[in-house]
Every structure is written in structure tokens, then in C-alpha cells.
Image (cartoon, rainbow, N blue to C red):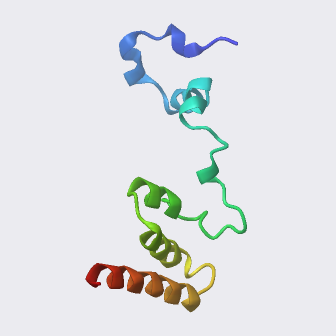
Amino acid sequence: MSNEWTTYTDDSINNATPEQWDKASKTVYGKLSHPSNVATQRQVGGNHYNKYEIQPVDFILANKLDWCEANAVKYITRWKDKNGVEDLRKAIHYIEMLIQREIG
């Protein structure tokens, strides 16, 4: 299989069409950078996080949140799609634990 990208000059990347960019992103190089079977891109036990631009787990990991912070984010994110007010109460509970830890 030939790779049409090898025929371009160094500055021709600036002239690539959207279709060429899309094709390049699906090459082995794109798959190494963006694997399709990443655990953080799958959800087990529902689909209530699928509609969000940023998955709670990605936000939590990127910001190095601790257990209580992470759970507050998780419950705030999903409350409308999963357990309603119960999830809001869970988020409040984790925030109360954070406050208690902070003030002693």
C-alpha cells in the first residue's frame, strides 16, 4: 500500500486537504498516537458519560484530583443522566469531606 504523503514536499503539508488530513490520522502513526482501544475511552456499565466533550476521568487524571475531589466531579457531571438528586447529594457529601479535611 502506498502512502500518498510521501510524495509531498516539506511545505505541502500546509496545502493538505481535509480528506488528506483525515486519511493521515488513520495511518499507523495516528493509531500509535491515538489508540482506539484506550481504557479511558470506554465506559463499562452505562453510557451516561458518552455525550460529554471531556470525560470526567480525563479531567480528573489531567488535574491530579484526589479521591474526594474526583468523586465530586464525577457525581456533578452525571447527575442529570443517572441518579438525579441522589448524585447531587453524593457530590455534596464529598465536598463536605473536603471542607472538613481543610478546616480540621
- Residue 55: in sight, yes or no? no
**x and y, in percent, of residue 45 in the image:** 72, 67
* Closer to us: 94 or 55: 94
Considering depth in this image, is 97 or 71 the residue closer to the camera?
97
User: Along the horizontal axis of the image, is 103 left or right of 10?
Assistant: left
Q: Which residue lies furthest to the right in this view?
A: 45
Q: Residue at x 50, y 86 (%)?
A: 88
Instruction: State which quadrant residue 94 falls in.
Output: bottom left
Relative to residue 9, is residue 82 drawn left or right? right
The percent position of residue 61, horizontal first and vertical second, equals: 46, 56
Q: In this view, does 69 lie above or below 60?
A: below
**Residue extending farthest left:** 103
Nearer to the camera, 11 or 66: 66
Where 18 sits versus 1, above or below? below
Q: Based on the displayed image, in which of its 4 quarters is residue 9 positioned?
A: top left
Q: Which residue: 50% across, 73% down?
A: 71
Residue 45 left/right relative to 29: right
The residue at 42%/65% (across/down) is 66
How far from the left and from the top, in percent, is residue 43? Answer: 67, 60
Q: Residue 92 lies in what quarter of the image?
A: bottom left
Question: The N terminus is located in which quarter?
Answer: top right
In this rendering, would 86 be left or right of 69?
A: right
Name the outermost residue toward the front: 104
Query: Which residue lies at the image location 55% right of the left edge and 84% below the top edge?
Result: 87
In the rendered view of the protein, which quadrant contains the C terminus?
bottom left
**The one of 39 and 94 positioned closer to us in this rendering:** 94
Q: Across the whole image, how many numbered discs are drawn on residues?
A: 0
**Residue 5, horizontal then vertical, whole percent:** 53, 15
- Answer yes or no: is residue 66 visible: yes
